[in-house]
Image (tube, rainbow, N blue to C red):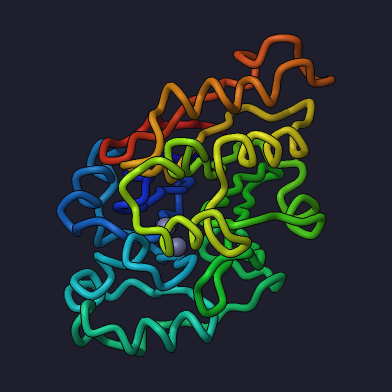
Amino acid sequence: MQMKTIASGSSGNCIYVGTDNTTLLVDVGISKKKISDGLMEMNRKLDEVDGILITHEHIDHVKGLGVIARSLNIPIYATRDTCNEICRMDALGDFNYGLLNHIEPDKSFRIGDISIEPHSIWHDAADPVCYSLFHKGRKVSIATDLGDYDDYLIHSLAGSDVLLVEANHDVRMLQVGPYPYILKQRILGKRGHLSNEAGGRLIRSLLNDHIKKIILGHLSDKNNYPELAYEAVKNELSGNEYADDVREFNLTVAGRNTPGELVCL
Ligand SMILES: [Zn+2]
Ligand SMILES: [Zn+2]
């Protein structure tokens, strides 16, 4: 199984996960052109994508969906309430709603040779989920847009070989930054986004002896820096039982607008 972030940040998200036979995208919150270019780096084509998994209806996760669905017949998977919200979004324009497939949290389904498990998340959307993807005993989990996490989510993400977890903001930068008060409260709330420290604590509870790669994602444009997110999470992970040196976990920060490295399992 392979995984690569094509874009990950508050202004657009798209993650590629694939095998020799199956190509999937988790979210399409950037332009069709950027997605095509990102896939091209792995010699994959957008019209060969077998499925698009949508986490929730916020524009940074669905921006490219209308254009893609109007031009290509790629099945789209999302919870029923997320599908309903997508259908109501003027920003996406008309598209073939027959491409939408309803999924449910905790009900596994399969696309090609990849099994997919959606997990419910705390976020201010209709019925948001994050995903774990399985192939040949390997598990890749992608968990962003969380205001909080609980034992259910820790249990759901446990045992992952590759983890993409949100490190959205530095709390102090957010507090003194330019956002309106109401938006700051939303981001800091239980259905908002994980701070660097909270993301680090979630990752710490998910460490195991076979984890191969940890990627920090969905960084805020205005309220974070990649170096700050990295240092804050590294600090949360230091002194853990699985490794003395966090470099052993291969911790990196996903590019907000540039594709990340290809992770192969
Ligand atoms: Zn969101
Ligand atoms: Zn988002």
Picture quadrant of ligand 2: bottom left
Find residue 32 and report its image quarter.
bottom left
Q: Residue at x 31, y 47 (%)?
A: 178
Q: Position of residue 253 (x, y in %)?
A: 45, 30
Q: Residue at x 53, y 86 (%)?
A: 80
Q: Relative to residue 57, is residue 70 drawn left or right?
A: left
Q: Relative to residue 155, is residue 120 drawn left or right?
A: left
Is 50 drawn above or below residue 212 in the view shown? below
Q: Relative to residue 44, is residue 22 drawn left or right?
A: right
Q: Residue at x 36, y 52 (%)?
A: 14
Furthest residue toward top: 244
Q: Position of residue 41 (x, y in %)?
A: 25, 36
Q: Nearer the viewer, residue 233 or 183?
A: 183
Q: Nearer the viewer, residue 72 or 191?
A: 191
Q: Residue at x 34, y 53 (%)?
A: 179
Q: How many marks?
A: 0
Q: Relative to residue 193, is residue 157 drawn left or right?
A: right
Is 98 drawn above or below residue 220 in the view shown? below
Find residue 244 and report its image quarter.
top right
Is 263 drawn above or below residue 235 in the view shown? below
Q: Position of residue 36 (x, y in %)?
A: 21, 51
Q: Nearer the viewer, residue 86 or 98?
A: 86
* Image quarter (top left, top right, bottom left or bottom right) of the C terminus: top right
Is 98 drawn above or below residue 179 in the view shown? below
